[in-house]
Structure formats: C-alpha cells, structure tokens
Image (cartoon, rainbow, N blue to C red):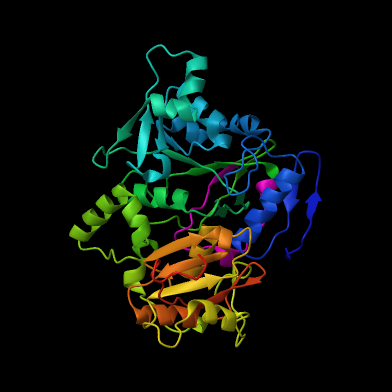
C-alpha cells in the first residue's frame, strides 16, 4: 500500500490504516488517530506510550482460548495498561506470571506471587502496577526459568507479525536478554494485544535484526495468527547498546560480563564505530532525520557567532551546540538521530526550553567530526543549527545564554 495521509474506516469495529515513512511517522499517526477518534483510554494522552484503548479487556479475553496459552506454564507479560486483563487471566488460570522489572533497573523480571487463597478481586489487584510492587519477588539470572509464552505491548503491528513499539526498545531488549539467559528460544511464541486500528501495513525496510516480531495479534474483534517466519532476535546485539544504556541497567552489565567470559563479541555501539566517515555514509530513516545533500546549514553563521570560539578566546571545547530544536522535540528524538548518524556523544545536556542541546565528546577531533556529520540535519521540519561550543567562564562548553 502506498503512503497516504488518511485512515479508512472498514466497519464499526475495524480500522485499517495505510501508512508510510519512518517508524516514528507510524507511531504519531496511530497515536493521533486513537486520540481524535476517542479510541484511547486512560492514561491519556496516549502519545509516547503503549496506548491503552477501549475494548482492551475484551481483546484479552481471546488469550486463554489460544492453544499456546493452554499449554504454557510460565508466561511473561509486559504490564502496560492494555495487558492488565491478560495478567489477571494468567493468574486466574493458576499459571506463573512474570513481569519485567520497570525499566530493568533492578533486574530482568519479577514473579507475581498472590497471597494464599486470593480471590478474583485480589488477583485483579495483583495484576496492577501496585500489585507488582506488593506481590512480586525478583527472578535472578541464575534461576534457570523457562518462559513458555511472551506478551508484549505494541503501538503498531502488521498482519505479517512485524511490530513497532513506543520507540525506547525495552521490549526488544527484554526478549534479547531472555534469549541470552536461556529463558526463551526461537520457537517461543509472542502475543500482542492491540486495537484494530493499530493493525497496519509496516514497510519491511523499517525492520532491523533486533526488532521483535509477534506470532499472534489479539484485537477486540479478531485473533490473527501471523505465521511470521522472520527470525526473532537471537540474543543481545551489543553493537546497538550504548555505554549510557549499559550504565543504567545492572542486569545488562551482568549478561555482558558472562558473554565476554565466554569469548563472545560484546563491543558496544561506540566501540564498534567511533565517529566513522562522512554523513553520506550513514543514511537516516526518512521522516526521522533528513540531511539534504550539499544543503547549507540554516542559521549556522549566527550559531557559530554565539557558540563558536572568538578571537582571543581559548581553543574550542569538545562540545557541540545544537540549536533550533522543534518546540515539541524530545530528547529521545535527538538521541535516535545521533545514533543513526553514528555520532552519539559521551553525554547529552538537554536544554529543551531554549530549543538547544549540548553534545559532549571525548576530544576536539570527535566533536569536529560530529559537526561535520550533522550538517543540514533536520528533526521533523526544523533544520537544526550545529557548531562547536565556545568556552564559557561559568559553564564550560555551554551555549551563551543557556
């Protein structure tokens, strides 16, 4: 299907969406549609979330009817709002429920342990975020747990089983980590629960090797067996992991140490491709990052005057000043653009209210390389301004006025 700007209502309960562009384009169209058509449910707005929707509980009622559910003993469910009823149904069926530790801060997942003799009301409480806090115990890397079935949230999914999450990559990473610890294998089925309007065409060109696919899609009106043959992640792709992410997730560091001792390649993103090549070697996804060939940098002269070194000042710092950020830009948008262009900094200082950010690199050469690669960078419709930051007495490497 070609990319269009509109949505087509097929019947009262089922909406198919023709979409194109980048993953973020698809996310935004889904989120916008769910809000404008009042399909969305609390918490709202659904933008930048796995969206909850009216009919989520009804969609989850298909879950116990799947043969893969009936035969499963241990089921891992991402406890986003649309999956709350799925969590309850797992507990009500007296199966073991595992949920991921929030943002993987303290481990990979927890096991929900309802109190003895818990009634349905108590089981429903156990299936909430409060229940996860009150009635769960951590599962360690050495627990040798085997997961029979995985449930993930989605922003968009295709009938072929291709999935788009909210853009942070946690579901993909969680699955890869489970592979690494031996908790799942290539035949472990994956289920997602979505509204009918979230079932869309997704261009195959947008998929990457680390993207998780799904085998079953549950909507309020349908059960879709995707028959997806695309391989699921075979483990952690360390070259996609940034030092920043590694620093935030202790269990990821433990898994990396294990694989390093086993002689596997565990080089991180920056270690694999440290500031390589010109920008033309790193094409970006359309709609997310645009870099016109030979395009001048709008406002570059003014930014250099503000951020660049001046006569008589010290040499420039290893910091890049990025300006003209869109008013609705989020730090994850800029980070994604920097990763796509292979110029991820050691540290990023976000100054959203001033529509700018500071990128801190390991040395001046790396900063200069980043400036070269970021020429003509766009976020959305905004052409960003890029220059080396000049030294500042109170805030080294800062942008004036920041």
Which one is nearer the viewer's eye here, 385 or 225?
A: 385
Question: Is residue 59 among what the camera can see?
Answer: yes
Which one is nearer the viewer's eye here, 243 or 325?
A: 325
At which x and y percent is residue 303?
Answer: 55, 78
Q: Is residue 391 magenta?
A: no
Say left or right for 75 vs 250. right
Which residues, given as a range, are shown in magenta?
Answer: 197-217
Task: Looking at this view, name the residue that lies furthest to the left.
Answer: 261
Question: Is residue 344 among what the camera can see?
Answer: no
Which one is nearer the viewer's eye here, 41 or 120?
A: 41
At which x and y percent is residue 286?
Answer: 62, 70
In the rendered image, the vertical position of residue 358 relative to residue 147, given as above or below: below
The residue shown at (40%, 78%) is: 367
At which x and y percent is residue 384?
Answer: 59, 73
At which x and y percent is residue 36?
Answer: 76, 45
In the rendered image, the vertical position of residue 221 relative to residue 226, given as above or below: above
The residue shown at (37%, 13%) is: 116
Question: How many numbered marks have been drawn onto this rendered protein structure?
Answer: 0
Picture quarter containing residue 276?
Answer: bottom left
Picture quarter containing residue 222?
Answer: top right
Q: Quadrant of the N terminus?
A: bottom right
Secondary structure that dominates the magenta span: loop
Which one is nearer the viewer's eye here, 307 or 152?
A: 307
The residue shown at (48%, 39%) is: 78
């Amino acid at each position: 299907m070609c990319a269009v700007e509109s949505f087509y209502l097929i019947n009262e309960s089922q909406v198919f969406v023709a979409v194109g562009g980048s993953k973020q384009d698809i996310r935004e169209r889904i989120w916008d549609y769910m809000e404008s058509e009042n399909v969305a449910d609390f918490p709202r707005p659904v933008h930048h979330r796995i969206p909850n929707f009216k009919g989520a509980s009804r969609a989850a009622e298909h879950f116990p009817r799947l043969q893969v559910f009936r035969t499963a003993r241990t089921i891992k469910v991402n406890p986003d709002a649309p999956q709350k009823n799925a969590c309850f149904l797992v507990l009500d069926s007296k199966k073991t429920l595992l949920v991921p530790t929030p943002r993987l801060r303290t481990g990979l997942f927890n096991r929900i342990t309802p109190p003895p003799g818990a009634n349905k009301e108590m089981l429903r409480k156990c299936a909430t975020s409060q229940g996860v806090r009150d009635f769960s115990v951590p599962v360690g890397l050495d627990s040798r747990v085997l997961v029979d079935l995985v449930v993930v949230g989605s922003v968009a999914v295709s009938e072929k089983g291709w999935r788009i999450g909210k853009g942070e990559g946690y579901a993909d990473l969680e699955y890869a980590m489970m592979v690494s610890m031996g908790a799942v294998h290539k035949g472990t089925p994956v289920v997602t629960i979505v509204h009918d309007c979230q079932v869309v065409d997704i261009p195959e060109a947008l998929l990457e090797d680390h993207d998780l696919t799904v085998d079953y899609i549950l909507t309020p009106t349908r059960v879709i067996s995707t028959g997806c043959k695309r391989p699921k992640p075979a483990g952690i792709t360390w070259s996609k992991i940034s030092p920043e992410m590694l620093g935030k997730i202790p269990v990821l560091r433990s898994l990396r140490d294990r694989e390093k001792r086993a002689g596997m390649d565990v080089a991180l993103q920056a270690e694999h491709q440290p500031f390589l090549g010109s920008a033309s070697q790193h094409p970006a996804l359309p709609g997310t990052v645009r870099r016109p060939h030979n395009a001048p940098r709008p406002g570059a002269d003014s930014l250099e005057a503000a951020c660049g070194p001046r006569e008589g000042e010290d040499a420039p710092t290893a910091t890049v000043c990025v300006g003209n950020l869109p008013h609705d830009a989020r730090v994850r948008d800029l980070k994604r653009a920097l990763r796509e262009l292979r110029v991820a900094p050691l540290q990023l200082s976000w100054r959203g209210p001033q529509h700018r950010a500071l990128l801190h690199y390991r040395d001046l050469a790396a900063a200069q390389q980043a400036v070269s690669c970021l020429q003509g960078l766009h976020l959305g419709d905004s052409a960003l301004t890029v220059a080396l930051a000049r030294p500042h007495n109170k805030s080294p490497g800062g942008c004036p006025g920041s």
